[in-house]
Amino acid sequence: MRNIVTMTRRELTAQFYSPIAYVVLVVFLVLSGIIFGMANFQPGAEASARMLFGLVPLILVLVSPLLTMRLLSDEFRTGTIETLMTAPINDAEVILGKFLGTFLFYLVMLAGTLVYPIILSFYGSLDTGLALCSYVGLLLVGGLFISVGLFFSTCTQNQVIAAICTLAILAVFTFLGDWLASGQEGTLRVILQHLSIRSHYEVFVRGLLDSNHVVFFITSTALFLFLGVKALEFRRWR
Amino acid sequence: MIEVKNLTKHYGAIRAIDNLTFSVGSDTTGNIIGFLGPNGAGKSTTIRILSCFQPADSGMATVAGYNVFTQSLDVRRNIGYLPESAPLYTEMRVREYLHFRGKLHGMSRRDRDNAVRSVTERCWLGDFVDRPIGQLSKGMRQRVGLADALLHDPKVIFLDEPTIGLDPMQIRETRKLIRELGDRHIVFLSSHILHEVEQICTHAIVIASGRILASGAPAELRERISAGSRLIAEIKGSPDAVVAAVKSLSGVGAVESDTQDEWTRLSIEANGAGDIREEVFKLASEKGWSLREMRREVASLEDFFIKITAEQRTGRG
């Protein structure tokens, strides 16, 4: 436990030292700001954050691989993994610490979007429940995206490969899940529908806190963290 | 302290280490153990296995009384490890990095403060503790890595090629530090420089192509190596008489000679392990010949490897 805290703190600090993290932060805030402005500051538009929250995961698909790509690939490339893994810390603690550190940075990113609901509350009555529900959804999506990125970063010492693989997987399951499902029939269709990240997430944006979908995000995040631990073990076994 | 039995490790089809067995760190071997071999001999692989970074295919190893494969975390609590390239987090400052490492070893805030102060002093890092590691030179980074390996006062310290890439001054300082470490820790270092191992270590293990070729006190190894050496001597006198007299000495093998002006330059091959320098000197003084040069052309480590491997092939080693 103490090791996880140590790793988390080191990873969060490392994010703040990294120029990539700041670029990600700025790009994320600029894109979400543009979406917010286009959706709301139009004559006759409703004062609602629904459009914004609906589209934030699409931005995350693009920027989250940049946050996660260096997590372990850089340790493998520079060799620091050797000093790290010969200290008394186990593989799961390393993976969890890196996950939590990056997740905390993601919280900082997300905190920047809090201004939008606040602005809206000046123009109309803000549906607080809906906004909270959307944020829960965003936390879950972010956690899943980070765990996927972390897994791919553990698989290769090349950051670019890690980022591209993460991007590809996230894009397929976020954008194409529904589309792929629509072309299928029977059990396959049900499975593909169930794997569509976007349809799970949209439930939250509609203001529904359904344990089904919460469980989907938590279990798939846990699955990728588990795969990350296994990948780390496997790479040392070679 | 370090016991290894039948340790074997493959990388794909390549056998990196082959059936290694040794036991060091006891009273007989002293505290500073040199692991000597050419590049690609399996030194780093062995150290990585002993420091619990990689598993082996078969065999058994214990470090500080714990099994490397089943008690990995216990082993890791008791070792310090400096990998060959001294990898560090370049964005951190020296002090910050050492505190991070101390935390991983479960040290309290006060212990860390004290330990960081003492290791930075021992590794001559005093003026650099607040510098980002990315700005430090290779030699300074090596010291940071060394400071990290000492931080938690481990029983066993593994150093993989600790002097590689350092300038001569830094090499001298590092060797001095390692000798001091022997008082309190078991130091297991790898090197491809015979001279270095001879200078620092109390025990040496010679390894090539994943096999142990020889082990013993560095002086003994030096003796084995120099057994195949040649003696160069320059003597003033009639060439034929000089060559004949030298050849008649016991322990002398083939003799080559080359005469320039009045001086005969002899290249004498010794038979067996004895030192014939004194005999040659006595001979020259008895006969009243002048002697202006005499030195042993010591075989290099590479020659030694070639010789030992050849011995093993013919079944004598």
Image (cartoon, grey):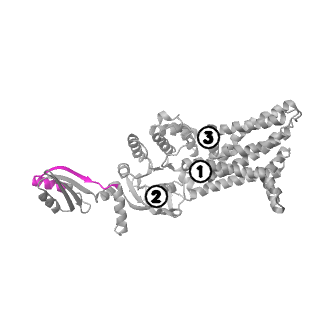
Magenta stretch: includes residue B295: yes
Q: Which residue is mark 2?
A: B42
> Tag 2, which secondary structure?
loop
Mark 1 belongs to chain = A
10 Å crowding of disc 3: few (<14), some (14-19), many (20+): some
Q: Which mark is in front, 3 or 1? A: 1
Q: CA distance from mark 1 to mark 2?
A: 23 Å
Q: Please report whichever mark, 3 or 1, sits nearer to the chain's N-terminal start.
A: 3
Q: Is residue A146 left or right of residue B50?
A: right
**As shown in the figure, which amino acid type bears the numbered disc 2?**
Gly
Residue in the image at 37% along x and 63% along y: B309
> For residue A14, which numbered disc appears in the image?
3
Q: Which residue is mark 1?
A: A157
- Asked whether the residues under the numbered discs 2 and 3 touch, taking CB atoms below 8 Å apart as contact, a structural biologist would say no
The percent coordinates of residue B185 (x first, y second) are: 45, 48
The percent coordinates of residue A37 (x first, y second) are: 80, 34
10 Å crowding of disc 1: few (<14), some (14-19), many (20+): many
Q: Which mark is in front, 1 or 2? A: 1
Q: Viewer-proximal residue, A173 or B174?
A: A173
**As shown in the figure, which amino acid type bears the numbered disc 1?**
Gln
Provide the residue span drawn in magenta: B278-300
Q: Is residue B226 left or right of residue A32?
A: left
Q: Viewer-proximal residue, A57 or A131?
A: A57
The percent coordinates of residue B67 (x first, y second) are: 53, 58
Q: In the rendered view, would you say A123 is above or below B86?
A: above
Residue in the image at 78% along x and 55% along y: A195
Residue in the image at 21% along x and 62% along y: B254
Magenta stretch: includes residue B2: no
Q: Is residue A105 left or right of residue A136?
A: left
